[in-house]
Image (cartoon, coloured by chain):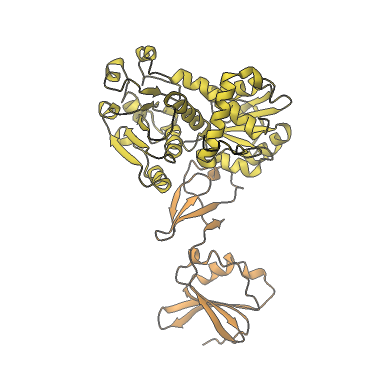
Chain colours: A yellow, B orange
Amino acid sequence: MIWEGKKAPTLEGRHFIDALDFSPAEYDALFSLAERIKSAPAEFSSACSGKVMATLFYEPSTRTRLSFEAAMLRLGGKVLTVADPRTSSVAKGESLADTIRTVGNYADLIVLRHPKEGAAKLAALYSPVPLINGGDGAREHPTQTLTDLFTIVTYKGRLENITVAFCGDLRYGRTVHSLIKALARYPGTRFILISPEELRLPDHVKEEVLALRKDVEFHETTRMEEGLEGADVLYMTRIQKERFFNEEDYLKLRDAYVLTSEKLKLAEEDLIVMHPLPRVTEISYEVDEDKRAVYFQQARLGMFVRMALIARLLGVA
Amino acid sequence: MLKVDRIQVGIVLDHIRAGNGLRIFEELGLAGREYPVALLMNVPSTKMGRKDMIKVSGALDLDLTKLALLDAGITVNYIEGGQVVRKVKPGLPERVVGLIRCKNPRCITSTESYSPSIFILVDREEKRYKCFYCGEYVRV
């Protein structure tokens, strides 16, 4: 660990809005804590006793919400949830700022998911307690990035000198944007970008990555078979229906890439296949039996790393 | 021609594109000030044909950070003892609050209208800014 021998960086009281809010050293410290929690969960089962976390979800996401809630409950804390804004004062026209200021009186920590880009940044300006971005539009999903990085560390033992192939919706896939930027801070990173022309990685993301590190390599292709060669990680994504303005465009691209056992034969034996879930058609069920498929373990690791994040923001571990 | 007295201490904003003076006058909030201010419009100019000018007497501490965004050709003359002591071509500010609106329909500022618009300079040469909230780029 980079910070080994020194005091672990403190995250107490901070917001987590963007994947780049934390330095690689701070990530390292979080992963170290997540590993400790994973190995000995009982030791942390009352770490957040007496603490309350509010989850405000302005768009549906059972998975992320449950992961956060499971994380808090396993730390011994309590959870307040607004899973459907139609049932809250938002329906009466309350602004996001007012909601955040009010909820900040009840909770020690807020997790926000919102369909608008930059919602978490705005909310953080008004939040009296640490605020975690649980996803804002097509922009950022930093705790998925934490999950992804922790998964790579767990399975590959490193974040340096990694070749990651991203496949599917690279235009609207916020998990992809966040992960690419976070990985670009480590030396020797190489990206293989597999997508249809319509869903290529936006130029602004590439520019941001190159601003972080000039020697990052990008290889773009429309052929999945080509992208599998030499990759350490294959990161599959769903073509997201909710990001399209019309159904016709969505249907045209939905089945563009499907990972099968046959295609996986082209990949390295020590490749890992990741997916932020939910999966639709992009990974055949037969692939689940392959030892390289780690996406369900990835979801589990996500809960542990969220436990570490909550504990650190609240200053209890 | 109109004649406005020379000022002893203050600021003269020169080379304002003709017709743009009133907007700059308003953006700088000069209407509510107690010291003498003159807005001159359509002043004959050898270089520009016509230009606008603003003379502010008795103040050297105006917030001029937005000027380059409002009119790229402006010259700021600082006057002391009736003489120009410094001429400045204002550069683009690092951070702009309230002047640019984000055009991204998915940006949170499109629905939460009370939120202050904030843009951060990312490329001075290309005159490119980035929305603080959603990251959308805009050229000024």
Quadrant holding the C terminus of chain A: top right
Compared to residue B7, the image places residue A92 above or below, namely above
User: x, y (%) of residue A116?
Assistant: 52, 38
Q: Nearer the viewer, residue A251 or A29?
A: A29
User: x, y (%) of residue A128?
Assistant: 69, 40
Q: Nearer the viewer, residue B116 or A263?
A: A263
Whether residue A109 sits left or right of residue A238 in the image: it is right
Write the residue at 62% across / 36% down: A131
Whether residue B139 sits left or right of residue B119 in the image: it is left
Q: Is residue A41 visible?
A: yes
Q: Quadrant of residue B5?
A: bottom right
Write the residue at 37% across / 27% down: A233
Residue, far front: A5
Q: Quadrant of residue A14?
A: top right
Q: Is residue A114 visible?
A: no
Q: Nearer the viewer, residue B30 or B127?
A: B127
Write the residue at 47% across / 51% down: B130
User: x, y (%) of residue A232?
Assistant: 35, 27
User: x, y (%) of residue A212?
Assistant: 43, 46
